[in-house]
């Protein structure tokens, strides 16, 4: 598939579909509907670690008690899911994005709540940020597939390089100023570099040349990359407590890692051939 014969705006109009946008809007609509409930009803839907239920394990991810918390999560969702969808649609991997998004919304709330029980504590969990971080993980994979649209030497198997680059940022942001943070960041950066070197070696052995692309295509990719590498500063703030609430960095990290690994493993296993672009649908 060549990008040059078609302008970016024309390709964007062809790629983005109303039904997909309506499907993505279900998540913020659910969060807004829950926020409209009385405070007591919202409290009953929050996930209590000492008294967990399947209903609250799922519903808690749509619960918010403060307007600024709701607004921040909805903005993050629009940014991550929005960029992910647009880039996936332009790259011809709509089916991959749709399958991953459906998994995040249907299964990840239960999975993240269940994994949170591995850390015993007397606390209550709520908020959409864990699911948002899953979309952040997916964005890393989609960015690589999007780049492969313009250079056939780039493959989905190079995506862990992007993941480890973001992991280095996460380590420095979530654990500032410590030796552990530096060690994790350095290890992640070295792994990202190893993937970059491996990819560069593959490029030198290939005779395929890069396709010409317009500024609109490049701008979309750059903005997606900025969102991918910049969102950890939002999702992994320095440890702090405000009004008795603590950001659940553990759940955010789980969401990010699983959000990348699940679709990446599906691609590697052959469920989706992201390198051949047959995923348009």
Image: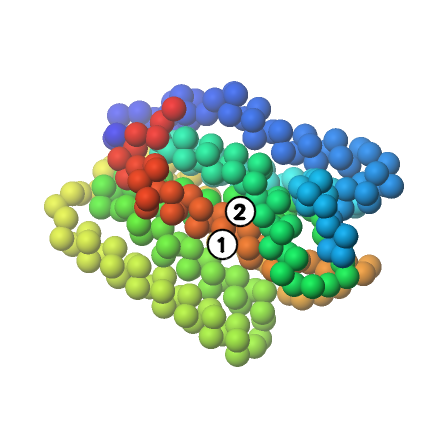
Residue 103 or residue 67, whichever sits in front: 103
Tag 1's secondary structure? helix
Asked if labels 2 and 1 touch by Cβ distance under 8 angstroms, the answer is: no
For the point 14% across and 48% down, the residue is 206
The numbered dot on residue 134 is 2
Q: Disc 1 designates what residue?
A: 257
Query: How far apart, in angstroms, are the residues tagged by discs 1 and 2?
Result: 7 Å
For the point 32% across and 44% down, the residue is 269
Against 36, residue 124 (above or below) is below
Residue 122 or residue 179, whichever sits in front: 122
Residue 215 showing in the rendered view: no
Quadrant holding the C terminus: top left
Tag 2's secondary structure? helix
Q: Earlier in the sequence, mark 1 or mark 2?
A: 2
**Residue 105 image position (x, y, % from top left):** 58, 37
Quadrant holding the N terminus: top left
For the point 47% across and 38% down, the residue is 100
**Residue 226 image position (x, y, % from top left):** 48, 49
The numbered dot on residue 101 is none
């Amino acid at each position: 598939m060549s990008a040059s014969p078609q302008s970016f705006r024309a390709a964007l109009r062809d790629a983005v579909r109303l039904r997909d946008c309506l499907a993505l809007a279900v998540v913020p609509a659910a969060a807004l509907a829950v926020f409209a409930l009385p405070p007591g009803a919202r409290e009953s839907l929050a996930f209590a670690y000492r008294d967990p239920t399947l209903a609250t394990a799922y519903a808690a991810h749509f619960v918010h008690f403060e307007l600024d918390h709701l607004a921040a999560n909805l903005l993050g969702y629009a940014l991550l899911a929005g960029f992910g969808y647009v880039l996936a649609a332009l790259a011809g991997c709509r089916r991959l994005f749709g399958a991953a998004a459906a998994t995040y919304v249907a299964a990840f709330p239960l999975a993240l709540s269940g994994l949170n029980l591995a850390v015993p504590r007397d606390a209550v969990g709520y908020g959409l940020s864990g699911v948002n971080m899953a979309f952040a993980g997916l964005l890393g994979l989609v960015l690589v597939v999007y780049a492969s649209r313009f250079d056939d030497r780039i493959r989905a198997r190079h995506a862990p390089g992007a993941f480890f680059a973001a992991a280095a940022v996460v380590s420095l942001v979530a654990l500032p100023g410590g030796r552990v943070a530096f060690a994790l960041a350095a290890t992640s950066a070295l792994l990202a570099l190893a993937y970059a070197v491996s990819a560069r070696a593959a490029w030198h052995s290939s005779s395929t040349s890069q396709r010409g692309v317009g500024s609109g295509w490049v701008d979309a990719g750059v903005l997606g990359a900025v969102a991918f590498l910049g969102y950890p500063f939002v999702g992994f703030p320095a440890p702090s407590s405000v009004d008795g609430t603590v950001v659940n960095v553990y759940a955010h990290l789980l969401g990010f890692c699983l959000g990348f690994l699940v679709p990446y493993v599906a691609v590697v296993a052959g469920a989706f051939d992201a390198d051949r672009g047959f995923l348009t649908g």
